[in-house]
Image: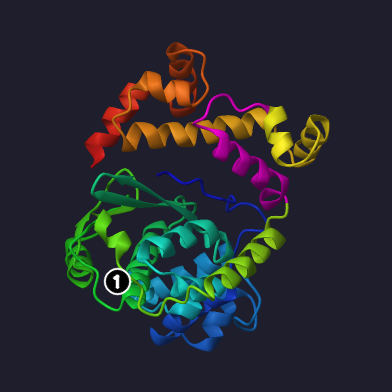
Amino acid sequence: MPLTDCSIPVATPSARVVATYAHTLWDAAHAEGLDDALLMATLGRAAIGDDDVSVAAYLDLLQAAREQGGPLFGWRLGQCVKPTTYGVNGILLLACPTLGDALQQVLRFESLVHDLGRSSFTRHGDRVVYAWRNDCAAHLMAGVLAESVFSGIQTCAQWLIGKPLSDFDIEFTHVTDAATSARIAQWSGARVRWGAAENRAIFPASVLAWPIPQANKALLPLLQQHAEALLQARYPQDVGIVAQVRQSISGRLGSGPVKLVNVASDLHLSTRTLQRRLADSGVAYQTLLDSSSHELARHYLGNSAMPVAEVAYLLGFQDTPAFHHAFKGWQGQGPGQYRVSVCQKI
C-alpha cells in the first residue's frame, strides 16, 4: 500500500547526508583519482569525518566525481554501498526476517540516512512498484544521483538475501546515451527505460517474501527502538504529537468517521489540549485527517476491486459524491480515473 514519506525540502538548512553515506561517495571519488586536496576543496572542509554533510556539499562532490569518473560513475557508486553506508539503518536491515520487512524499514527510517529524496512503494496484485522521489531534481547531478540510489538499492538487497536480484524493470526520469544505457542494463540485469514519468523499479511481489539469512528477530526490536529515538531527536515534532495523531487516525479509518474527540481519547488528552499541541506543531487536525484519508483511499482504489461507494463509506463520508469531491481535491482526478490510471501503469 502507499506509504507516507517524511520529507524535508533540500532548501532547508537542516537538509543533510549522514557521514557514513557521504563516506561512500568520498571513497568512490578517491578511487576515481580525485586527490585529497580537490576533495577537501570541493567540500570546503578538511575531510569527511563523523559530522553530517550538507546536501549542497554532497552534490558538489558528486559532480566532481562524475566529471572525473565518467557517465557510469553514478551506477558504480551505488555498487559500493555496504551495511555501514546506511548507518544504524543498515544494521537494522540486516536483522529483518524478509526483504519486504527490510523495505518497510527503509521507508520508515530513510530520513536518518539523507535528505536527498524519499522512497515509497505500492503493491498491485503480483507486482510491486518501488518509487524514489528525487528532491534534487533541479540539480545538474539529478540523474547521476537517481542512478546511484537505485544501484545502491539493488546492491543492498543482494547482500541482504545473499543472491543476485535481476529480471525486473527500472525507469528513470532522465535520459542518457546508448552506451551508458546498455552498460547499466547489463550490470543491473534489469529492463531499463529512460525519460519516464518517475524514478521507479517494478518487480514481482514474491520478492518481498525472500528471507534474509542473517535475520536476528531478537535484536530487531532493540534496533528499531534505537532508530526511533534517533528519528525523534531529528524530527521531534513530527514523531511526537503529529505522529501519534496520524497513528490514531490510521487505526480508526476504515471503521467510520474519525472525530477529534475520538483521537484525543486514544491519546488520553482533552480535545482542547490536543488542538493546542497540534497548533504548536503548526498543523491542523483536519490536515492530518485529509492526508491519512487520501493515503488509505489510494490504497483501496489501487489494490482492490472495492466499489467506490464502499471506499467512501469506509472512510466515513456521508455519501459517494462527497468522497468524489474530496478525492478530486486531493489527487486532481476522480477516484474512478485514479483507479484506471494506476492499472495502466502496471
Q: Quadrant of the N terminus?
A: top left
Q: Is residue 88 above or below residue 316?
A: below
**103, 257: nearer the viewer:** 257
Q: Is residue 317 above or below residue 345?
A: above
Magenta segment includes 244: yes
Give the SS element for disc 1. loop
Spot occupied by residue 145 in the image (x, y as percentages of width and height) = 41, 62
Amino acid type, label 1: Leu
* Residue at 31% in and 34% down: 304
Q: How many marks?
A: 1
**22, 160: nearer the viewer:** 160
Q: Which residues are magenta?
A: 237-259
What crowding class fits label 1: few (fewer than 14 Cα within 10 Å), some (14-19), or many (20 or more)? some
Q: Quadrant of residue 103?
A: bottom left
- Asked if residue 122 shows in the view, the reply is yes
User: Which residue carries the number 1 mark?
Assistant: 72
Spot occupied by residue 134 in the image (x, y as percentages of width and height) = 44, 53
Q: Quadrant of residue 278?
A: top right
Magenta segment includes 254: yes
**249, 127: nearer the viewer:** 249
